[in-house]
Image (cartoon, helix red, strand yellow):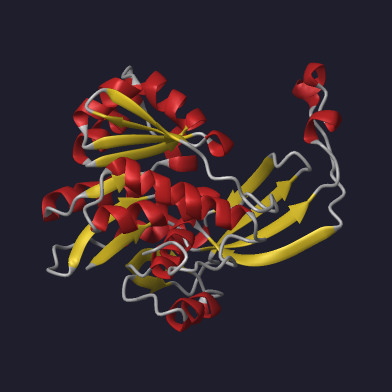
Amino acid sequence: MAAVICGSLAFDTIMTFDGRFADQILPDQLHILNVSFLVPAMRRDFGGCAGNIAYSLNALGGKALPMATVGSDGVDYIARLQSLGIGTEFVRELTDTYTAQCFITTDMANNQITAFHPGAMQQAHVTRIEARSDIKLGIISPDGRDAMLQHAEQFKVAGIPFVFDPGQGLPMFNGDELARFIEQSDWVTVNDYEGKMLSDRTGWSSADISRRVKGLVVTLGADGCEVWVGGECTKVPPVTPTAIVDPTGCGDAWRGALLFGLERGWPLAQCAALGNRIGALKIAARGPQNYQIDRAALAL
């Protein structure tokens, strides 16, 4: 069975700053902020939330169907997905714009400053979700605003259970819109910062949100995650990585594992535990789609 992954396909330009942002940014001068970071290391990777989640789910043995839009420079990305065995029937090409581009600078404390050009992603809402016998679940990850709103409605109408994963797209929506997303979805995933913003805008605590869906997961980075079901919280411990190399795409790797477990009917805490293991694998590799998963070692 397949999972439809709504979100971005993007090219990530990833740069490394050999210092700490906090040492260069003066808190009392933020009103005239003008900083420059020397980044001696730079590379370009395949990225975007839909691509990263699909990579993780596919590597685990699931069937990923990213639903995204690329621009005139997206031919290589489509070819890459196909070479990995990831379906591209829901990937639409536009000829008059660029594929989404993400420019990420990471400092020595693994803090990140990101600039994002949406490009073709702004037309992602044109592709529609329809009921299909082989599609078992879906996810709404950061995408164009209209696409996130419309795809959530379409998942609901089609009777396809889905995860609401607003990520960096959360600030685009007001409290009423976020409440509607929650009411339509079956599961919600956020990191701790996003979780606080989601609660602030909706007026609902994590416990409140978890009573409106099958489950809420709040990821805590190196501290593991909280799994909320029916108002009750279970702490899922972290997995210590072999190395901390690059945090880019860790959340997406985690969400691919979440989908893998949900498709198999696992309890939410078990899905989250697998997510923590895959996140630890990813952070030890550079780029969002360059890590390898040994399914035998994971006993999958």
Q: In the image, residue 292 lies at what x, y percent?
A: 55, 68
126 to the left or right of 273: left
Q: Which residue corresponds to the image point at 17% horizontal and 63% vertical from the top-left? A: 130
Query: Is residue 145 shown above or below 95?
Result: above
Camera-side residue of 290 and 141: 290
Q: In the image, residue 166 lies at what x, y percent?
A: 40, 41
Res. 257 visible in picture: yes
247 to the left or right of 183: right
Camera-side residue of 226 and 38: 226
Res. 142 visible in picture: no
For the N terminus, which image quadrant?
A: bottom left
* Total marks in image: 0
32 to the left or right of 297: right
Camera-side residue of 283 and 235: 235
Q: Which residue corresponds to the image point at 52% horizontal and 51% vertical from the top-left? A: 279
Q: Which residue corresponds to the image point at 47% horizontal and 77% vertical from the top-left? A: 78
For the C terminus, which image quadrant?
A: bottom left
Residue 21 lies in quadrant: top right
Camera-side residue of 113 and 237: 237
Residue 12 lies in quadrant: bottom right
Q: Which residue corresponds to the image point at 58% horizontal and 37% vertical from the top-left? A: 222
Residue 117 lies in quadrant: bottom right
Q: In the image, residue 194 lies at what x, y percent?
A: 47, 31
